[in-house]
Image (cartoon, grey):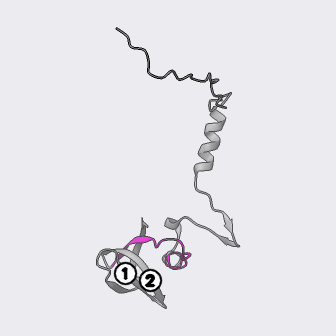
């Protein structure tokens, strides 16, 4: 036994919506793949008269200057320092002639190291 509806609601006849989509597709060719590989390789760019370098290719002085001259709106970069066969993780706060002030990442303790004692500086992240 089927029941009649209590209200008869007339449904409007709507047209199917038109969604503009991609009409064509081109698969990458060998030339496109080679061009994308060449573009993905790091290049040295000319910026404000100074030549930018990859961080791993910089000298220790250049790395410290790079870490200290970051814009204020950019988060501090955490680094791994190797000083006298010991590892420290944190960020650079200041530089004084042949020394620099360093803050430990976990303990927030500040250390003062000589620049000549640094054997390696590696970027960890933000």
Q: Are marks 2 and 1 in contact (CB under 8 Å)?
A: yes
Image quadrant assignment for residue 70: bottom right
Q: Residue at coordinates 62% horizontally, 49% vertically from top-left?
A: 39
What distance separates the C-alpha of mark 2 from that of mark 1? 7 Å
Q: Which residue is the extreme one toward the top? A: 1
Mark 1 lies on residue: 103
Is label 2 in a helix, a strand or a loop?
strand
Q: Is residue 74 magenta?
A: yes
Callout 1: few (<14), some (14-19), or many (20+) C-alpha neighbours within 10 Å?
Answer: some
Query: Toward which corner of the image does residue 1 lie, by quadrant?
Result: top left
Q: Along the line of sight, which residue is nearer the eye, 70 or 7?
A: 7
Image x and y of residue 24, in percent: 68, 28
Return the x and y of residue 80 as percentages of the image width and height: 37, 71
**Residue position marked by numbered label 2 in the rendering:** 93
Residue range of the region highlighted in magenta in the rendering: 64-83
Residue 64 picture location, percent across and down = 49, 78
Left of 60 or right of it: where is 119?
left
């Amino acid at each position: 036994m089927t029941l009649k509806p209590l209200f008869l609601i007339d449904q409007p006849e709507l047209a199917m919506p038109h969604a503009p989509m991609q009409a064509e597709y081109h698969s990458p060719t060998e030339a496109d793949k080679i061009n994308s590989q060449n573009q993905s390789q790091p290049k040295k760019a000319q910026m404000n008269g100074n030549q930018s370098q990859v961080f791993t290719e910089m000298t220790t002085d250049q790395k410290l200057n790079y870490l200290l001259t970051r814009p204020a709106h950019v988060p501090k970069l955490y680094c791994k320092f190797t000083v006298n066969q010991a590892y420290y993780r944190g960020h650079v706060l200041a530089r004084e002639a042949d020394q620099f002030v360093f803050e430990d990442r976990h303990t927030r303790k500040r250390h003062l190291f000589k620049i000549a004692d640094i054997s390696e500086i590696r970027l960890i992240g933000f």
